[in-house]
Amino acid sequence: MQTLFPVVYSTLSPEALAAFVGQQYAFSEVSCRFLVRGVGDTYIIESKNSRFIFRVYRFLHRGYSVIEAETTLLKALHDAGVSVSYSIADKNGSLIQSFEAAEGTRFGALFSFADGKVVPAPSDAQLRNLGHEIAKFHNVSSAIKLDGITRTFDLKTTLFNPLEKTRDYFSNDPEGYEWLNNTAHKIDTALSKTDTSSFSKGYCHFDFLPKNFHFDGDKVTLFDFDFLGYGLLVNDLMTFWTHLQMDLYFNRITKERAEESFRILIEAYREIRPVSEEELNIIPYLALGFWTFYMEFHSTHDQFYQFITEPAVLKMRIGFIRQLVERNWPVR
């Protein structure tokens, strides 16, 4: 007889995790505090002399092989001197832990703490350091092979598949959906005129928004590689450009400052790694794929449902995307 009603999501006890981490990692005087629910659950671990982050991944979002690939990449990045929050091995040398939760086996990992805080509008010096670290990340991610990563970033996975899977959410805004679909086909046509065969490819973070890196003074630490996938590396520069465009849309920044901020970032990036003007020119076309990719993701995770199920939120998002296109698409 079944004694436990099936669940799709559970939250691991911070107290139990504190005891587990203390034993598994040989830490003393350990405390644990639940921090945030996102793609997975994030906890702050404090021991006698240090702070850490413990991530517990969702049951259906990421399997063991994907988490293993992420921790492998983070170790390679840390070894190469890239400023990232990296995974830490337990007393037995294991980077990944497992927990038999109500919904099934969940995996977790301990990470170094990213000192500092989110800075929505980085200074020039902070932008330079961010450009350097993204370039250093790409130097590694373009050269490594990660067998566990199967996600790819292309027009099919970022535009056409997400649009098909989110069609039903536009019942209150069929005109908005038609515009998105037509615009996706225009992007396909526009990019077909560009030879991307020489463009840099590798594993992308695909979420370089300010919430995913901390500044401690001018020093930056990158984290949150939940959406790791393979594709054109300019996608990562596109995500930060999209952040600047959002700030411009909501009048948090001037057009001149947005352009200057991106110029500083790119100049710093080029001090470490080349990126061509042709690659930068396709950023406005790739940006729509950022929004549709995350629309699909929001439709599959309950804590993000409001971003896709609330008609007003969806309509505001389409309004932003339309302005993004009108402001930034050159005639091709």
Image (cartoon, helix red, strand yellow):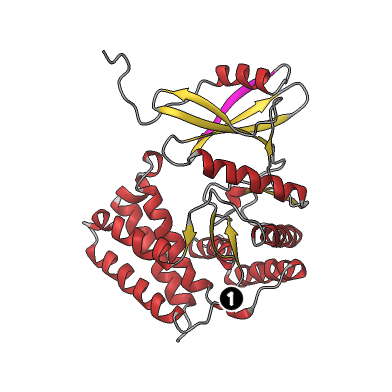
Q: Nearer the viewer, residue 119 or 9?
A: 9
Q: Nearer the viewer, residue 167 or 329?
A: 167
- Viewed as shown, does residue 142 lie left or right of 296? right
Asked if 87 appears above or below 299 in the picture, the reply is above
Q: Residues within 10 Å of mark 1 (few under 14, many from 20)?
A: some
Q: Residue at x 60, y 48 (%)?
A: 212
Asked if 12 appears above or below 108 in the picture, the reply is above
- In the image, the segment drawn in magenta is 30-36
Q: Residue furthest bottom?
A: 332
Asked if 215 appears above or below 265 in the picture, the reply is above
Callout 1 amino acid: Glu
Residue 287 horizontal/vertical position (percent): 48, 67
Q: Identify the image quadrant of residue 18.
A: top right
Q: Identify the image quadrant of residue 70.
A: top right
Q: Residue at x 66, y 67 (%)?
A: 261
Residue 194 horizontal/vertical position (percent): 50, 82
Assign a secondary structure to mark 1.
Answer: helix
- Does the magenta stretch mainly form a helix, a strand or a loop? strand
The N terminus, quarter of image: top left
Residue 193 horizontal/vertical position (percent): 46, 84
> Does any portion of residue 215 appear in the rendered image?
no
> Does any portion of residue 207 appear in the rendered image?
yes
Q: Identify the image quadrant of residue 291.
A: bottom left
Q: Residue at x 67, y 19 (%)?
A: 22
Residue 77 horizontal/vertical position (percent): 71, 50
Residue 5 inside the magenta-drawn segment = no
Residue that label 1 marks: 279
Residue 35 inside the magenta-drawn segment = yes
Q: Residue at x 62, y 55 (%)?
A: 145
The C terminus, quarter of image: bottom left
- Viewed as shown, does residue 270 lie left or right of 56? right
